[in-house]
Image (cartoon, rainbow, N blue to C red):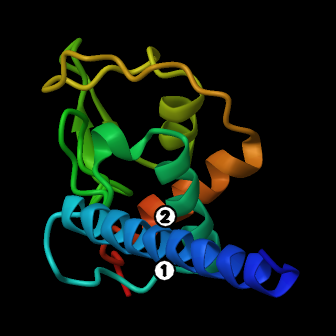
Amino acid sequence: MTIGQLTSQHRTGRGRQGRASGVLIVGLALFAGACGGGSDAGPTLSAAGESGKRIALSSGCAGCHGTDGKGGVGPTWVGLAGSERELQDGSTVIADDDYLVRAIAEPGADLLADYQLQMPQNRLTDDDIADVIAYIKDLSPRVGG
């Protein structure tokens, strides 16, 4: 076999792998999109909100709160910011920045009344938490203008 034939054979084999990888990537993207639940694009996200969404997806938050923030095993993030939430002890809290930081940084601090599972500890930095909160706020309607 000549060097030209080997090179041609190598390119052909690599091309098949590339096409197979491309098909796999497209399939995974379609599957991930299907998991998002719904075809609506959702709200326009700020730069920090986009970063927060990426962090939520890569850090496992979306596993409970949904890939689009609409909830699941954990509470929805849609409309959360600024809302009143009932805690397991019967008290209520406003989901302001202080509450959201505490809920993410100290998952066992304020347990919601309707959810029995406690959010697991995470290793998010203060900047990560700020971006996730920006995402949560982007998913909430603007109150008062």
Image-quadrant location for residue 51: bottom right
Q: How far apart are the two marked residues, 2 and 1, measured between alpha carbons?
A: 7 Å
Task: Look at the picture and state if 5 lies above or below 121.
Answer: below
Give the labeled residue for mark 2: 135
What is the x, y in percent for residue 130?
A: 65, 53
* Cβ atoms at labels 2 and 1 below 8 Å apart: yes
Left or right: 143 as drawn, with respect to 55 = left
Relative to residue 35, is residue 14 depicted above or below?
below
Counting residues from the N terminus, which is met first, the one under dot 2 or under dot 1? 1
Q: Callout 1 environment at 10 Å: few (<14), some (14 to 19), or many (20+)?
A: some
Nearer the observer, 59 or 31: 31
- SS for callout 1: loop
Q: Amino acid at mark 2?
A: Tyr
Res 92 → quadrant: top left
Q: What residue appears at the point 56 percent right and 74 percent down from the top-left corner? A: 18
123 on left or right of 27 = right
Element class at badge 2: helix
Q: Residue furthest front?
A: 1
Q: Position of residue 99 (x, y in %)?
A: 48, 38
Residue located beneath label 1 in the image? 45
In-image side of 86 versus 94 (left or right): left
Left of 76 or right of it: where is 95? right
Question: In the figure, 121 relative to 69: above or below?
Answer: above
